[in-house]
């Protein structure tokens, strides 16, 4: 039985040189700023051809110009918009090899008196639907290439409890579960699916937390550190992995404990 058949994570092997990315076609969502911007530029430096996707047209076009690529406005919470993004990429470059599904927003509400259905739907639409819809839209293009790689941006909030923002924790846990499940499921098709789980990293999503982080002396992870980790994932061969990124530590796949198996029936 293969790792994919058993549902186990397929572990990373030796990291390949970034030259392996030369000529590859990559879609990066949420690429107008922060982690997406840093990764789009890192991919371009490695020789990839990049399509920058974001709702921020001005920022997105600036990044696309810097990357020597193309910009496409895209609301990742809309399935048809994801499909149109892939079609645009096929028109521009003839195929797709890589998708970084990175777009995300802060929740901005809890589940008590401050619950706001509109904010909740917005966060779930960007943080979870954007990954599901993006994956659905890009899979046919990856299959047409004989395989490819998808990396979803999750968070340390997908690996631990988040009492200050339980809804954000919920949608990021969902992305982690999706990566762990789709990794082995897609492995027979030569499509790798992984997630990156940064802590407090340089992006707009932490703007409302900067004061608290400063007061508590918590370092902000440079966006470039996240981008470097994404490139490590793309040039490795693991799938179903969720790479944590924490200040002062070397990024690596998080080691999940196995779920306990069934015990003996009572009285046996």
Image: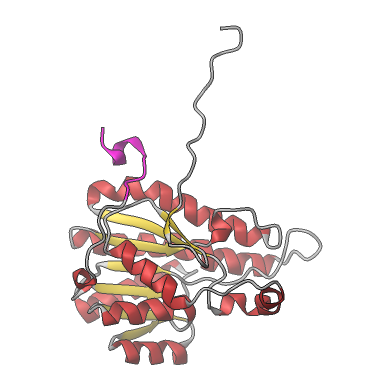
**Could you tell me how many numbered marks the image carries?**
0
Q: Residue at x 55, y 60 (%)?
A: 156
Q: Quadrant of the C terminus?
A: top right
From the viewer's perspective, is 213 left or right of 61? right
Residue lying at the far front of the rendered structure: 248
Question: How would you classify the magenta stretch by its main secondary structure?
Answer: loop
Question: In the figure, residue 253 lies in which quadrant?
Answer: bottom left
Question: In the figure, residue 67 lies in which quadrant?
Answer: bottom left
Q: Is residue 73 visible?
A: no
Q: Residue at x 51, y 64 (%)?
A: 246
Q: Quadrant of the N terminus?
A: top left
Residue lying at the far top of the rendered structure: 268
Residue toward you, 46 or 91: 46
Residue lying at the far right of the rendered structure: 113
Q: What residue span does the magenta drawing correspond to?
A: 1-11
Residue toward you, 221 or 114: 221
Give residue 143's position: percent from left, percent from top: 23, 58
Residue toward you, 36 or 189: 36
Give residue 136's position: percent from left, percent from top: 37, 59
Q: Residue at x 67, y 75 (%)?
A: 209
Q: Residue at x 41, y 46 (%)?
A: 181
Residue toward you, 30 or 220: 220
Q: Is residue 193 visible?
A: yes
- Relative height, residue 184 to residue 248 (above, below): above
């Amino acid at each position: 039985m293969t790792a994919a058949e058993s549902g186990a994570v397929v572990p990373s092997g030796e990291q390949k040189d970034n030259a392996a990315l030369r000529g590859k076609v990559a879609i990066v969502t949420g690429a107008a700023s922060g982690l997406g911007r840093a990764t789009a530029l890192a991919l371009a430096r490695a020789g990839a051809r990049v399509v920058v996707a974001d709702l921020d047209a001005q920022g997105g076009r600036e990044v696309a110009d810097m990357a020597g690529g193309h910009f496409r406005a895209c609301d990742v919470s809309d399935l048809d918009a994801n499909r149109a993004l892939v079609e645009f990429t096929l028109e521009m470059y003839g195929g797709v090899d890589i998708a970084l599904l990175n777009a995300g927003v802060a929740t901005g509400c809890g589940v008590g008196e401050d619950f706001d259905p509109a904010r909740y739907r917005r966060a779930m639409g960007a943080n979870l639907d954007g990954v599901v819809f993006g994956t659905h839209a890009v899979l046919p293009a990856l299959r047409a290439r004989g395989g490819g790689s998808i990396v979803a941006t999750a968070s340390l909030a997908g690996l631990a409890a988040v009492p200050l923002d339980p809804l954000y924790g919920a949608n990021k846990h969902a992305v982690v579960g999706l990566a762990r499940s789709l990794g082995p499921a897609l492995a027979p098709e030569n499509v790798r699916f992984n997630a990156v789980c940064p802590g407090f990293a340089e992006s707009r999503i932490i703007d409302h937390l900067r004061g608290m982080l400063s007061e508590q002396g918590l370092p902000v992870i440079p966006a470039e550190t996240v981008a470097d980790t994404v490139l490590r994932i793309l040039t490795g061969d693991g799938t179903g992995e969720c790479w944590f990124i924490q200040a002062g530590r070397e990024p690596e796949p998080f080691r999940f404990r196995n779920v306990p198996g069934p015990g003996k029936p009572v009285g046996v």
